[in-house]
Image (cartoon, coloured by chain):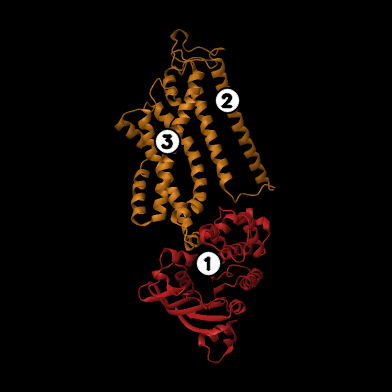
Amino acid sequence: MSVLALSQKRIKKAKVWLISIILLIVLAAVAYTFLYLKHDANMTDVGNRLASPTQAHPLGTDHLGRDVLTRLLLGFRLTVGYSLIALAAAVIIGVPFGLIAGLRGGWIDRLFMRIADGFLAFPDTVIAIVLSGLLGPGIGNLLFAIVLVKWVNYARMVRSTVLTEVRKDYVTIARINGLSTFTIMRKHLLPHIIGNVLVLASLDFGKIILLISSLSYIGLGAQPPTPEWGAMLNESRPYFQANPEMMVYPGLAIVAVVLVANVLGDYLRDKFDVKKEVQP
Amino acid sequence: MTVIEIHNLKKSYNPGKLAVNDVSLSIQKGESLGLVGESGCGKSTLAHCLLGVEKMDAGSIVYNEEPIAHANRKQLRNYRRNVQTVFQNPTASLNPKLKIRDSLLDPYLQFKDDLQLKHFHFTSKQDFVQQLLETVELPKGLADRYPHELSGGQKQRVTIARAISIEPKLIVLDEPTASLDVLSQGAILELLGSLQQTLGMSYLFISHDLAAVYQLCQRIAVMKDGELLDVFRKEEIYDSNRHDYTKELIDIF
């Protein structure tokens, strides 16, 4: 085994450790909050605002006296939940689009792909901002905008995979055997697509979290008092100089989740690549 | 008994130039017919028409005394079940994401409802896969491997096993040895010969290699520029009335 391969193995090990540690921290925090503390995320206590960490408020309180840890954990559920919803919708719309375009070809393919090109011509953030502006700010509209931008990636990727694979002899032989288009899709093409989709999805997952958070930060996504991380960042902005940790916590949370999503993407890519080196 | 008849088949890709020009051939039961010619002479196009990958422009293919152009669903299914194929490139012929086992079972799963196998008797799919691997002289352990873990010769054996798995009447071999090294070529030809002995199917063996064709086939057809020039029995290869082009080919080998 070469030096390079060895160091890559070490990096992989380090990544697994990283994921385990982050998951452990999250689990410990969840357990702590829900076993010992029963704070309402929106319960204000102005007398105890901007408090330092105490036993009751392990990460202190924000400018309205709300418990930061509780909000952070609820924010995890919201942010991750929202991006999963957006992601699932994008995949569910994009994959069939790509399959049909790739397998049918002809004018259907051209029509689908011109629509996709139209969406691709704008940067994600710009479309999201424009749509939020048109439909009004709010998490629902933001998710709609994200789905609208993201499905194109899946449709295009699936289509290109289908186009390269259907020309290969094994698909021709399946056709000679009289396998239906659906069976060919399910048995022969899906294994090629599923890995790619999962890898792209796990990378997109991080991007969508960033997009939701950044648009919530500028006030176009989740509205106060929703404890979404980007919105939390936005709310703590005026108190940045006196209480910087109020911004650090949601910021760190975003970094951690995006990191985990990316490492997961790498892991899935290795997992679905059957051609990887067989472990000695 | 005739397995398949090709009557006056014509096919062109570009207007004005026929890739296959008025070719008629027939293949008898248990016979190997070799089809030789240089690259681009239309022999693969002929195979593709036979396999239904390409639509022919004119002519007919008769199977079971029935032109397949007029075949109904059931007859077409029967045709497909009885005409299998092995292509030139074994790597492209196997789905890289499927285990050997799943690739092997593809035709069986497609046709299992109306399949009556004479040679293979098995209790489970597992058993069937093992028998198939054994028949093409591959180790049983390969069933759970992926194609990229196999050599070119092994992969071609897998595609042959897949083709024979449902005991077809005819196998169209489209240059099955062309992408293999010389040793594997010989081994594959021997395997094809012995499989024909045990299973009794017919071959249409397409190749540019006259020596290989001579080794495997009882009859040889020669094509050039889309036209069928010469069809003769193997013993007649040195006859004086062979076509000039055939003599040229013989001189090369």
- Label 1 chain ID: B
Q: Residues within 10 Å of mark 1 (few under 14, many from 20)?
A: many
Q: Position of residue A67 (x, y in %)?
A: 49, 15
Q: According to the image, label 3 marks what residue?
A: A86
What SS does tag 2 mark? helix
Residue at position x 36%, y 41% in the image: A122
Describe residue B141's horizontal placement relative to residue A129 as left or right.
Answer: right
Q: According to the image, label 2 marks what residue?
A: A27
Mark 1 → mark 2, Cα distance in angstroms? 57 Å
Chain B pictured colour: red
Describe residue B57's horizontal placement relative to residue B133 as left or right.
Answer: left
Q: According to the image, label 1 marks what residue?
A: B84
Q: Is residue B225 visible?
A: no
Q: Is residue B17 visible?
A: yes
- The label nearer to you, 1 versus 2, is 1
Describe residue A150's horizontal placement relative to residue A33 as left or right.
Answer: left
Mark 3 → mark 1, Cα distance in angstroms? 46 Å
Q: Are marks 3 and 2 on the same chain?
A: yes
Query: Against A249, is B9 above or below?
Result: below
Residue at position x 43%, y 78% in the image: B7
Which chain is orange in the picture? A
